[in-house]
Amino acid sequence: MVPLTWYLILAAALFCIGLFGVLARKNAVAVLMGVELMLNAVNINLLAFWRYTALGQLVGQAFAVFVITVAAAEVAVGVALFIAIYRQRDTVNVEELDDMKG
Amino acid sequence: MEQIFFVLLSVLILGAALMVVTTRNLLHSALWLIAAFFGIAGIFILLHAEFLAVVQVLIYIGAISILIIFAIMLTRRIMDPQQPRFNSQWGLAGGFAALLFVGLAAVVTRVAWPVATGAPPTDAIQQLGADFVGVYAVPFEVASVLLVTAMIGAIIIARERE
């Protein structure tokens, strides 16, 4: 059996790659893809902990289902926002969207 | 045997994820994202969470990836590969992400995790279904309200205004 630590390291690496995408990409859609990678890393962690420590209850699986639900809602709203912004500003470059900067 | 599959899937996931955040062409990024999702579904199967693996393929690959590809298509001009893909702080962001990974890896490998032995339940899917109308009934309903709200919100936000 694969040790639990391997799964945790994989999830940590995936989370950090997603974080880099969120912080460094210029395009808002690419930022959203980074967020998706981070959410998937969280799901790997939840299921790995379920498999290795709490087999009796299905808390980990149920939590992962809720994370996927929230991710779906987030993408739907995010994509709608990008389309609205693109229609108005003709860009989804996050560096040009600084109206709320103080 | 399981270890070999795990390593292969990890290489697929991490390689695809790196391509997602570094490829110039956004459409290729989205396709690499689908590859990463498939690898993660494989990891779920290794973890004996078969239901979650199917949900992963249905929701992430079937719905979320398609939505993202739609967004890329509808904001066509931004697909121009000549544009710079990173902002000016990408070096800092990369350093921070690498530092965070080192920190997480150090913690994860040092803690002695309690590991339960035993086979996973064979009726996990039935149990999960019963839990959703039993123990987790309230969160389940809240999730459905969230989905409806998100759907209505998305329609209102993206609607064409005169």
Image: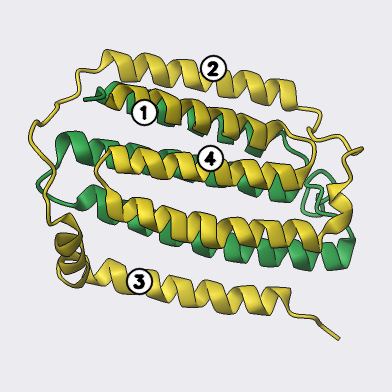
A40 or B5, nearer to the observer: B5
Residue placed under numbered mark 4 in the picture: B36
Label 4 and label 3: CA atoms lie apart by 29 Å
**Mark 4 or mark 1: whose residue is earlier in sequence:** 1
Q: Residues within 10 Å of mark 4 (few under 14, many from 20)?
A: many
- State the yellow chain: B
- Which mark's residue is nearer the viewer, 2 or 1? 1
Label 3 and label 1: CA atoms lie apart by 37 Å
Residue B159, label in figure: none
Label 4 and label 1: CA atoms lie apart by 15 Å
**Mark 3 or mark 1: whose residue is earlier in sequence:** 1
- Which mark's residue is nearer the viewer, 2 or 4? 4
Marks 2, 1 in one chain: yes
- Residue B99 is left or right of residue B6, and the answer is right
Residue occupying image coordinates x 78% and y 60%: B73
Q: Residue furthest bottom?
A: B162
Circles 2 and 3: CB distance less than 8 Å?
no
Circles 4 and 3: CB distance less than 8 Å?
no
Give the residue type at disc 1: Phe
**Mark 2 or mark 4: whose residue is earlier in sequence:** 4
Label 2 and label 4: CA atoms lie apart by 23 Å
Residue placed under numbered mark 2 in the picture: B99
